[in-house]
Image (cartoon, rainbow, N blue to C red):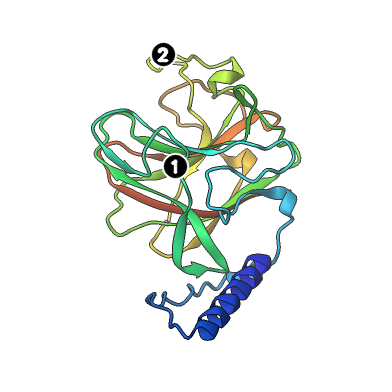
Amino acid sequence: MTMNLTKTTLLALVASLSFACSGESDPAAPEPAETVDPNCAASGIIDPTLLIDDFEDGDPLIAGVGTRNGSWWISTDGTAGTITPEAEQGPPAERILGGRCGSDYAMRVQGSGFTGWGAVLAAGFRYNAGPEPIDATNYRSFSFYARTSDDTNSSIRVQLQDSSTFPEGGICNVDPEAPDACYNGFGTELLGLTTEWQEFTFELTELTQRPDWGYHADAIDVTALFGLEFNFDPNRTFDLWVDDVWFHE
């Protein structure tokens, strides 16, 4: 994040000099001070080839690294709930007021009122006329920062979709009512999520499937990962911020 912080500092300096030369004052209200996070100093610079997305470009696309060229997407069960940003489109990143560890943007999704299976924020890893998998054999884990709001009462599950759980893998059943239905990805609930930014790290091989529905595989197929998801419960309220998503070797 050092590069982002330097860029931000330079832009602020240019802006202040421009106002000084023109004789104008900045009409914008001052932003809150950057979030003080004890993990900031220890984070360091991560290998950029491992980046999934840091959201600093503000768009829905993940970082174009190697064969990864996918994007973020929001979907819902189609019932009469509300969600921001809108569903069935690529969501833009949102400005972090006050920043976080030199980061200015993160992905945010908030909603309530869905009565089917709920809603999901997903990042597809590769797309070429259709979703394609990536080989994650060299990756040991993945991490991200996250926070929520006081009114969130939904559990939030993070999971990976692989060749056995994603429709394009050709193994699970695309019929959502079938006992071997797709989308029962390998993941875990985000326990301990609060209104403060926290870093979460998960080993790929320690993720598990839900026991009570969908197709079940013996283990996650790290040679064919289709995407990363954050799942929200039906009949609940949710407000999730996600930032700095990385693979780790």
Q: CA distance from mark 2 to mark 1?
A: 22 Å
* Percent coordinates x, y for residue 231 in the rendering: 42, 39
Considering only vertical position in the picture, is 122 above or below 57? above
Q: Nearer the viewer, residue 75 or 219?
A: 75
Q: Secondary structure at mark 1?
A: strand
User: Measured along the vertical axis of the image, is residue 56 above or below residue 98?
Assistant: above
Give residue 177's quadrant in the image. top left
Q: Which mark is residue 8?
A: none
Q: For this rendering, which residue is in front, 98 or 180?
A: 98
Question: Which amino acid, mark 1?
Answer: Arg
Residue beneath the point at 38% across and 56% down:
148
Q: Is residue 58 left or right of residue 219?
A: left
Is residue 85 at least partly visible in the picture? yes
* Res. 89 image quadrant: top left
Side (left or right) of 192 relative to 205:
left
Residue that carries the numbered disc 2 in the rendered image: 178
Q: Residues within 10 Å of mark 2 (few under 14, many from 20)?
A: few
> Which residue position is annotated with label 1?
157
Residue at x-position 71% and y-position 63%: 45
**Residue 3 location (% of width, % of height):** 68, 66
Instruction: Determine whether 149 is above or below 130 in the image.
Output: below
User: Label 2 amino acid?
Assistant: Ala
* Secondary element at image label 2: loop
Horizontal side of residue 111 vs 11, given as left or right: left
The answer to which of 221 and 238 lies nearer the viewer is: 238
Q: Quadrant of the N terminus?
A: bottom right
* Rendered view: 174 above or below 62: above
Name which residue lies at 53% across and 52% down.
Answer: 58
